[in-house]
Amino acid sequence: GQNIDQPTEMTATEGAIVQINCTYQTSGFNGLFWYQQHAGEAPTFLSYNVLDGLEEKGRFSSFLSRSKGYSYLLLKELQMKDSASYLCAVLDSNYQLIWGAGTKLIIKP
Amino acid sequence: GAVVSQHPSWVICKSGTSVKIECRSLDFQATTMFWYRQFPKQSLMLMATSNEGSKATYEQGVEKDKFLINHASLTLSTLTVTSAHPEDSSFYICSARVPGEFYEQYFGPGTRLTVT
């Protein structure tokens, strides 16, 4: 079956760095997405990785290792507004998004 | 960028009634749209894939006679929840794919449905 695992909840301090991990087992792989979702809102796109390595975009970076079925989202200089759920999703061989359950990130002052 | 809208943003209905949710791609033509449902503190669950001019493809466990999907034009897909029950209360989100882009979906803002 298809499976995506990420921690349920993480807590970090404002100004700090946090890494949210995601492991996956899917039928085929056409890329991995990270989305941010605030409570009661739709997901917003953060990053897309299809090749191994690190993609940096401002305070957010995303890493992918296809051989390990592993990705992480790195958030630097955390701000209170970063409190949200972070969803990992894999595009499978049918170009269908397979979603993880999401990681709720709590930022404390 | 590609913009997707949903209407209404929230709706309250009585048990047994039907509710229609619209999903529109505002600045592009979407041959494929997706309907998701999200229960509190859970991730998105794909309900169905809607293709313009053809029948929707429903995911396993989703009742096609209860959740009617119509993708009548390249910019509009509708989801009708028929004979709604309190357990259908959820956050319904649509997304659309830009033709030729197989990797990204653009999400609507979601519709909060409460069935009393």
Image: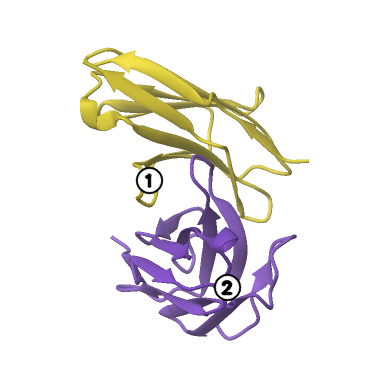
- Residue drawn at x 58%, y 67% is B85
**Which residue does the numbered mark 1 point to in the structure image?**
A45
C-alpha separation, residue under disc 1 versus residue under disc 2: 21 Å
Question: Which secondary structure lies at badge 2?
Answer: strand
Q: Measured from the top left, where is residue A58 in percent x and y?
A: 25, 29
Q: Colour of chain A?
A: yellow
Q: Measured from the top left, where is residue A59 in percent x and y?
A: 26, 26
Question: Farthest residue in the right direction?
Answer: A1
- Residue drawn at x 74%, y 43% is A27
Using the image, determine if residue A45 lies above or below residue B87: above
Asked if marks 1 and 2 fall on the same chain, the answer is no
- Residue drawn at x 69%, y 62% is B59
User: Within 10 Å of the Cα at label 2, are there few (<14), some (14-19), or many (20+) other Cα atoms?
Assistant: many
Q: Quadrant of residue B69?
A: bottom right
User: Within 10 Å of the Cα at label 1, are there few (<14), some (14-19), or many (20+) other Cα atoms?
Assistant: some
Question: Which secondary structure lies at badge 1?
Answer: strand
Q: Quadrant of the N terminus of chain B?
A: bottom left
Chain with colour purple in the figure: B
**Which residue does the numbered mark 2 point to in the structure image?**
B50
Q: Measured from the top left, where is residue A63 in percent x and y?
A: 47, 25
